Amino acid sequence: MKLKTKKRYILLIFLFLIFFIITFKSMADEENEENRIIPLGEADLLKVTIKFGAGKLNLISGEEDEFKGNFQYDKSILKPNIQYEILGETGILTLSQSIKKDLGLPIPYKNIWNLKLPPGIPLQLYINTATYNGDIDLTNLQIEDFYLNSGASQTNIVFNQPNLIDLKNINIKTGASTLKILGLANANFNEMDFTGGAGSYTFDFSGNLTKKSKVSINAGAAKIILKIPSAIGSKIIIESFPAVKLDIRGFEKINDQTYISPEYGKSDVKLDIEIKGGLIDVEVISLID
């Protein structure tokens, strides 16, 4: 009886090993690299939707009238799905793959996208990611709308030169993350809405602000850093629970919630910022030209 039981255990172990080997081989694919070039055709507006899993996402300006993408991955399930069509005068570019929660893949694995978007056409950019690392350089692009929805992540967003068209809305939602946005005055935006979990968030308003812009920030258990040139007329309203640390330099305190810069109200060009949240640490730095 004991011998039969022992044989059963050996058979079960053997079957488990076979299953493990088959599973491992199916996932341990060779490293892959794809390069794609997509001409835009007669489109006057480009809507770009990016659904990206865990990995590294790089995005910059590229050629005038085409999309270029470089995709590197070492699991076949990470192969990107790339679709482009023109509806009316709008080009619709969709780049997608299963996000991390759908995969169950062991870490580490390779997943890198290097994307180049065309600067010669207005862009509506929608990015949805899992846990990822992103460098998003929007310099020289014509951004009309920008949406980012991410899990726990590390993201850098840059506007090194003025956006050539009105950016209607910047909308960012993120989990526990580190986020830096540089050159925000160059974005030429009307409104920015940010919602974040615990993390560190830097909003640098360097650049050339040319109109009234409104910013709403809602975060919990977070460090928030605002860097604002002294030449920009700015008002900051902070609505938070009592447990909050404030370090605000170069602004006049109007009441317990409101701070204004010396240039605020002197022209139609101004920056209105509202911050809500609990357990937040707010630091405001006035940048001298």
Image (tube, rainbow, N blue to C red):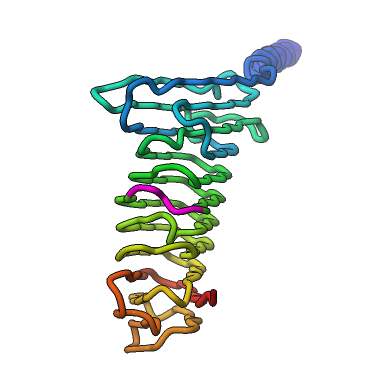
Q: Quadrant of residue 44?
A: top left
Asked whether residue 235 appears in the rendered view, the answer is yes
Q: Position of residue 117 (x, y in %)?
A: 48, 34
Q: Position of residue 14 (x, y in %)?
A: 72, 13
Against 265, is 41 above or below? Answer: above
Q: Is residue 216 found left or right of 199 in the rendered image?
A: left
Q: Nearer the viewer, residue 135 or 65?
A: 65
Residue shown at 34% from the left, 44% from the top: 144
Residue shown at 56% from the left, 44% from the top: 134
Residue 55 lies in magenta, yes or no? no
Q: Is residue 281 found left or right of 23 in the rendered image?
A: left
Residue shown at 45% from the left, 72% from the top: 279
Residue 164 lies in magenta, yes or no? yes
Q: Position of residue 110 (x, y in %)?
A: 65, 30
Against 143, is 106 above or below? Answer: above
Is the C terminus in the top left, top right, bottom left or bottom right quadrant? bottom right
Q: Position of residue 181 (x, y in %)?
A: 50, 57
Against 187, is 248 above or below? Answer: below
Span shown in magenta: 161-165
Q: Quadrant of residue 258?
A: bottom left
- Dominant secondary structure (helix, strand or loop) of the stretch shown in magenta: loop
Asked whether residue 1 appears in the rendered view, the answer is no
Count of numbered circles in the view: 0
Q: Is residue 158 found left or right of 163 in the rendered image?
A: right
Is the N terminus in the top left, top right, bottom left or bottom right quadrant? top right
